[in-house]
Amino acid sequence: MSRSRYRILEPLLPQFVTCTVVGWLPIFAHVRCTMVLLDCFRFLQRNRALKLYGYVILENHLHAIVASKELAELLGDFKSFTARKIIDLLRKGGISPHTVFLKRLREPHRVGQTSQLWQAGYHPKAILDERMMRQKLDYIHFNPVKRGYVESPVHWRYSSARNYAGQKGLLDVVTGW
């Protein structure tokens, strides 16, 4: 039985979602792991009609505002694909400290899994109006500032803040809403 807090209840609206690494491990402090996320977002945008309105990737979680007719399926595919790729990177020893990360990720919640990267769910919240969109974008973009990582949102590389400031970001985003 699915939990309603993990279901998309307003499928035609953009959704604010959060994906968190099991145990809050700092997996995305490693550029190779973050690139897996960015590449997957690009693929979904080009091939599966994912609309990306905003995002931020921090060391152990990400926030995004996304939309698609098949959003629940796309988010499931995103989490599944990125988990496999990143766990494969860890198993090959491409990320240090890979053994520590692998040991901590070996607490799967599903039968047959040997490792789990993402916590269950993505906590969708429908964006109901322009005010709410602006509030969620500000939350996303100022997250690295509040953590003390940068002084300005546009200084955080893994964020759509640059797109909204008229600069080129790492991913294309829909800024006209």
Image (cartoon, helix red, strand yellow):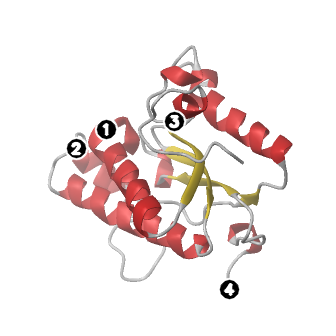
Of the image marks 1 and 4, the number of the one nearer the N terminus: 4
Disc 1 vs disc 3: Cβ atoms closer than 8 Å?
no
Write down the residue under mark 2.
95
Q: Position of residue 127 (x, y in %)?
A: 78, 54
Residue 30 - label:
1
Q: Quadrant of the N terminus?
A: bottom right
Q: Is residue 77 left or right of residue 101?
A: right
Instruction: Place residue 46 in its image quadrant.
Output: bottom left
The residues bearing labels 1 and 3 have C-alpha atoms spaced at a distance of: 16 Å
Residue 55 visible from this viewpoint: yes
The residues bearing labels 1 and 4 have C-alpha atoms spaced at a distance of: 35 Å
Kind of residue at badge 4 = Met
Which residue sits at x=64%, y=28%? 142
The residues bearing labels 2 and 3 have C-alpha atoms spaced at a distance of: 22 Å
Write down the residue under mark 3.
159
Write down the residue under mark 4.
1
Kind of residue at badge 1 = His
Disc 2 vs disc 1: Cβ atoms closer than 8 Å?
yes
